[in-house]
Amino acid sequence: MDKHSILVCMGWEQLEIRLQKCEGWEQIEISLPNCSSLQVISFPVVQLHLNRTAMRASQKDFENAMNQVKLLKKDPGNEVKLKLYSLYKQATEGPCNMPKPGVFDLINKAKWDAWNALGSLPKETARQNYVDLVSSLSSSLESSSQVEPGTDRKSTGYETLMVTSEDGITKIMLNRPTKKNALNVEMYHEIMHALKAASKDDSAITVLTGNGDYYSSGNDLTNFTDIPPGGVEEKAKNGAVLLREFVGCFIDFPKPLIASGQCPALGHLPSPSLGYSIAVYASDRATFHTPFSHLGQSPEGCSSYTFPKIMSPAKATEMLVFGKKLTAGEACAQGLVTEVFPDSTFQKEVWTRLKAFAKLPPNAMRISKEIIRNREKEKLHAVNAEECSVLQGRWLSDECMNAVVNFLSRKSKL
Ligand SMILES: CCCC/C=C/CC(=O)SCCNC(=O)CCNC(=O)[C@H](O)C(C)(C)COP(=O)(O)OP(=O)(O)OC[C@H]1O[C@@H](n2cnc3c(N)ncnc32)[C@H](O)[C@@H]1OP(=O)(O)O
């Protein structure tokens, strides 16, 4: 600091004020760390330059921040991702220069809106804001994982599941109760991982269940908003690959698998877990609903094959084509559910039974399951492949886009 500089403390931060004579004007330059743009304020006798030259992010900082984003362990959510996207575009290309996407091109429209909203923000400022945002993001996500390590993650290594193994039973519990156990991409991967681990552990049986007041609400519809650089086509293709692998894990799961649901099951998880479970136990409060047509989609989880076989083609049509919701009693009468228990005694009765099953010779159970299911395996994999390919096309349809927009806008997610 030269002799004309003074440091002023303004409570929350320090300002450096430099005084210099300038053609008869008194010019005061103030460095304000959180000021993102150069401003000049004129007074009758002085000009104040607020600048943050020293604070400007270098290209290197920007590149580091871009790398840091890829390493974030937690998804920061769509709102933040849109902000990052828009700042990145502004920093690298300047003001939005793209034609506005069509109304049904949801994702690109959201991205365009975010970028366009930055107006003529200078590239340097956008770069700085990007760096600041990434830095705040890294520290907030790190600190949240320090403060709240996620008891489940710590004890089980999973972010979206609680997996326990006890008394010969591995229990895989979907654990996003605030989102009604909707399956985000991470949950798909974690379920596959948990099933693969359960197939090799020393438990005799595996139970799939949900935490909270929904067994599951199916595919997380915000999955549709996270569009990769290749656009919606690439998104749909990736979704089909993921779904095929996910359902494949159920088809190949070697041990007895039991779905235990005390509450409503919606969409997508019911299909694979009902179709391939050795037993489905439900409380009298549970319901089963596959609203594929409502969402502009088509059956998955091999339900187009297993449901007509388990129920009847006519009943399966009501459920899979018209989205008719079944009560637990109806589902049981139609063979989708093994047994219904009163809600008040559900846990006690089901777990007593499961513990008894888990004491049976595990190899005999595995071999028995194998002989029941193996004849169908090839067929199920073929059905799965076909369903995923049909769905890939559906996800690009206006019908599907509209349904997702309706849900997300109802929830103000767009
Ligand atoms: C990649 C493979 C894709 C395979 C495709 C599979 C097809 C399907 O899975 S079809 C089924 C899709 N699911 C749905 O259509 C269900 C949508 N959700 C709902 O209709 C309702 O949320 C509900 C009936 C399940 C519950 O309604 P309720 O009023 O009790 O609670 P909400 O306030 O609506 O929900 C709380 C919270 O949870 C979020 N949420 C619930 N379900 C989903 C979902 N499927 N996707 C994303 N988010 C979901 C909801 O937005 C709320 O979040 P906020 O608190 O942040 O608003």
Image (cartoon, rainbow, N blue to C red):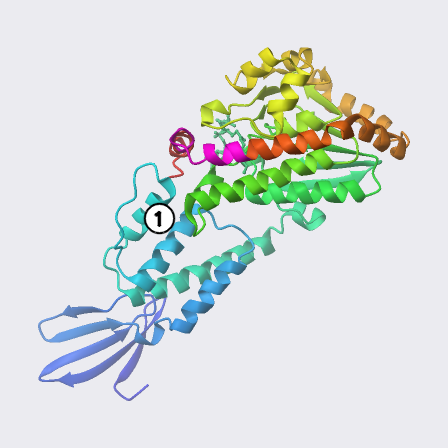
Percent x, y of residue 42: 13, 70
Q: Which residue is mark 1?
A: 111
Residue located 35% across and 40% down the image: 105
Residue located 28% across and 89% down the image: 3
On screen, residue 147 versus residue 11, left or right, reads right
Q: Is residue 398 magenta?
A: yes
Q: In the rendered image of this protein, does residue 148 appear above or below residue 192?
A: below
Q: Which quadrant, please, contains the C terminus?
A: top left
Give the main secondary structure, helix, strand or loop, of the magenta stretch.
Answer: helix
Q: Judge whether residue 211 can be spotted in this image.
A: no
Q: What type is the residue that disc 1 sits on?
A: Lys
Residue farthest to the right, as pictured:
361
> Is ligand 1 within 8 Å of the beta carbon of the residue shown at mark 1?
no
Percent x, y of residue 407: 42, 31
On screen, residue 153 versus residue 364, left or right, reads left
On screen, residue 88 versus residue 168, left or right, reads left
Q: In the rendered image of this protein, does residue 249 appear above or below residue 134?
A: above
Give 267 or 166, whichever is nearer the viewer.
Answer: 267
On screen, residue 161 versus residue 183, left or right, reads right
Percent x, y of residue 285: 63, 18
- How packed is label 1: few (under 14 Cα within 10 Å), some, or many (20 or more)? many
Q: Quadrant of residue 396?
A: top left
Residue located 60% across and 35% down the image: 385
Query: Magenta stretch?
Result: 389-401
Percent x, y of residue 363: 88, 34
Q: In the rendered image of this protein, does residue 77 appear above or below residue 132?
A: above
Q: Is residue 396 magenta?
A: yes
Give 110 or 148, whichever is nearer the viewer.
Answer: 110
Q: Quadrant of residue 180?
A: top right
Q: Which quadrant, please, contains the N terminus?
A: bottom left
Q: Judge whether residue 161 can be spotted in this image.
A: yes
Per the image, label 1 sits on a secondary structure element best described as helix
